[in-house]
Image: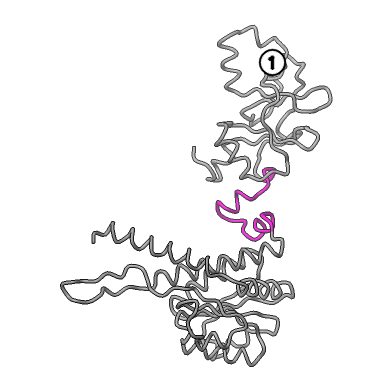
Amino acid sequence: MSSLGLARSILADEAAALQHLASGLDDRFERAVELIVACANQGGTVLVTGLGKSGLIGAKISATMASLGIPSHVVHPSEAAHGDLGRFRSTDTVIAISFSGETDEVVGLAGILRQDGLPIISVTGGAFDRAPSSLDRLATVALRLGVTHEAGKEHDARLGEDHFVAPTCSTTATLALGDALALCAARVRNFTSKDFARRHPGGALGGLLRPVTDVMRAVAGKNLPLIADSKPVSDALREASAIARRSGALLLVDASGRLSGLITDGDLRRLVLRDRDALDRPARDVMTKNPRTLLDAALVRDAVTMIREHRQDEIPIVDSDGRPVGLLDVQDLIAMRLIKD
């Protein structure tokens, strides 16, 4: 089999493992979510433990929970017996991961924690209907992956044996199950995108969840004049040019102070080329009326969507009464690397 063919086979096997896992979920999953929610609500910590690759997958599950407002840490099962048992409190819940369900270090730790009365969620492999493993028997809720084989197994006819395969379907299924537990628990706890943004301020994802008012550099009344739409275009341009760093568009307002239109630098260039006398006409006669806007409560991701869908380089930001509070320029988002130039 070629490398391309093998890769497709591996991905197909892992996708099938996830579908099988999804079809096998039952009320034990809901009980596990309840334990996680109860733990977080009473100020406890979800402690995740596993050895080897199970530990690495557990670290990602723990990180996902923490980013969703569920306090979580990773505990190495071997180090727990050498002082880290002090990390566990009566309010905590444990997720113990072992594909075989017989990993000595994980089973030993679960046995100690079971005596202390801590809730334990076990994640083990094998068929859904197989006999309980040692870890399953110690768990408050025992979750099964339903994985019976790993992807990538290939028989070598020349050698008369199978090629060795590393954990693939099992680790993928464990990671996906952890994502499902974390997201479902966060949903039950009414965790919102605003909550996520407070816990994840860095990176592109954090940037997309920031309010647009945090990133706009042109602020009404500060460095962005709001110009009456009754003024001649030339006066409007002169008033805007009085600002040291002029934005790429003029915001026009009506007599009540509400946004009535917008004139971009591109509009001005086209206007001069088409009709030089137009500079003496009222701005309301040449402006783009009722431009697309965003409310000041919108998020940066909303601005990115508008720019991508409508190719709009300047977005007026208005309050609930339609009064301008600022102007978001596409360059502001390019500087944050949220969109490409």
Q: Badge 1, how many Cα within 10 Å: few under 14, some, many 20+?
A: many
Residue 290 rendering spot, x and y as whole percentages: 70, 25
Disc tally is 1
Q: Which residue extends farthest front?
A: 129
Residue at image location 63% in from the left, 74% down from the top: 32
Q: Is residue 250 left or right of residue 129?
A: right
Taking 86 as reference, is 121 above or below it? above
Question: Is 231 in front, or is 175?
Answer: 175
Residue at 61% across, 45% down = 301
Say which element carries label 1.
Answer: helix
From this view, report whether residue 100 is shown above or below residue 201. Answer: below
Q: Which residues are magenta?
A: 192-214
Tell whether position 61 is magenta: no
Q: Camera-side residue: 81 or 128?
A: 128
* Residue drawn where x is 57% and y is 17% of the image: 269
Q: Which quadrant would residue 179 be assigned to in this image?
A: bottom right
**Percent position (x, y) of residue 114?**
62, 89
Work out whether 243 lies above or below 186: above
x and y, in percent, of residue 2 in the image: 24, 59
Residue 307 quadrant: top right
In magenta segment, residue 208: yes
> What colour scheme has been applied to the protein in the rendered image?
one colour
- 89 relative to 56 in the view: left or right: right
Secondary structure predominantly adopted by residues drawn in magenta: helix
Amino acid at dot 1: Val
The residue indicated by pointer 1 is 233
> Which quarter of the image is occupied by the N terminus?
bottom left
Q: Where is residue 113? Give x, y as percent.
A: 61, 89
Q: Residue furthest left?
A: 158
Q: Residue at x 69, y 71 (%)?
A: 37
